[in-house]
Image (spheres, helix red, strand yellow):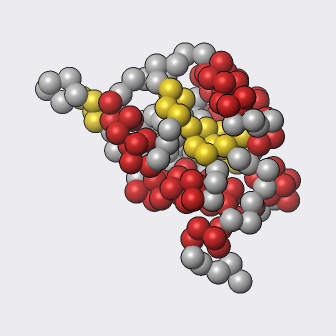
Amino acid sequence: MDKKIIEKASKIKLLILDVDGVMTDGSIILDNEGNELKRFHVRDGHGIKMLGKAGIETAIITGRQSKVVELRAKELGIKDVYQKIFVKSEIYEQLRKKYECENENIAFMGDDVVDQELFKRAGLTAAPADAEESAKKWADIVSGKNGGRGAVREFADIILKATGKWEQVSGESLG
């Protein structure tokens, strides 16, 4: 891992995530009654839970509204869930102030052009392997995994290891 990335990751106190294409594979499944279904990866969820155990908050800012996102966030202990947000930078600033963070203390993972402002502001940024090309260009890290397929976990692990909290929450020895 690049020393510059490790240095940036070591300062993270808050992770902000997009949902569709990041926490999910970007598919939107509608049933005959109009219920929206999404598929989440259990290892991504475990990464988020480990961040929480390490004292690193996670928040969601997404452009869509979905009950399933609320349910998944509750399962993972994510308290800050903002849906149907079209100007994500306003919520970013609210979260920055709430958690008393500087930009360098915030990590962000997004996957498309609507995330550009957060890619510019956050101290450490990542995009899934299958993100839109411009998002991958803006990101500090491009995951080896696709959205909804372990990209969030990979990013969480980088943050946990760089902050020195990996062993505390994983039970594994790095040596």
Report which quarter residue 99 is drawn in.
top right
Residue situated furthest top in the rendering? 86
Task: Residue 137: tell me if it is visible.
Answer: no
Q: Position of residue 63 (x, y in %)?
A: 49, 22
- Quadrant assignment for the N terminus: bottom right
Report which quarter residue 25 is drawn in.
top left
> Depth check: 100 or 140 in front?
100
Q: Image check: 73 left or right of 30?
A: right
Report which quarter residue 132 is drawn in.
top right
In the rendered image, the vertical position of residue 28 relative to residue 43, given as above or below: above
In the rendered image, the vertical position of residue 127 relative to residue 96, given as above or below: below
Residue situated furthest bottom in the rendering? 175
> Depth check: 113 or 65 in front?
65
Q: How many marks?
A: 0
Q: Position of residue 47 (x, y in %)?
A: 53, 57
Rendered residue at 57%/76% (across/down) = 171
Residue situated furthest left in the rendering? 32
- Quadrant assignment for the C terminus: bottom right
Rendered residue at 74%/48% (across/down) = 12
Q: Image check: 129 left or right of 96?
A: left
> Depth check: 137 or 154 in front?
154
In the rendered image, the vertical position of residue 141 relative to residue 71, given as above or below: below
Q: Image check: 37 left or right of 104?
A: left
Q: Position of residue 129 (x, y in %)?
A: 57, 47
In the rendered image, the vertical position of residue 137 relative to residue 32, given as above or below: below
Rendered residue at 52%/19% (across/down) = 85
Task: Residue 155: tell me if it is visible.
Answer: yes
Q: Image check: 117 left or right of 77?
A: right
Q: Position of residue 141 (x, y in %)?
A: 70, 48
Rendered residue at 51%/56% (across/down) = 49
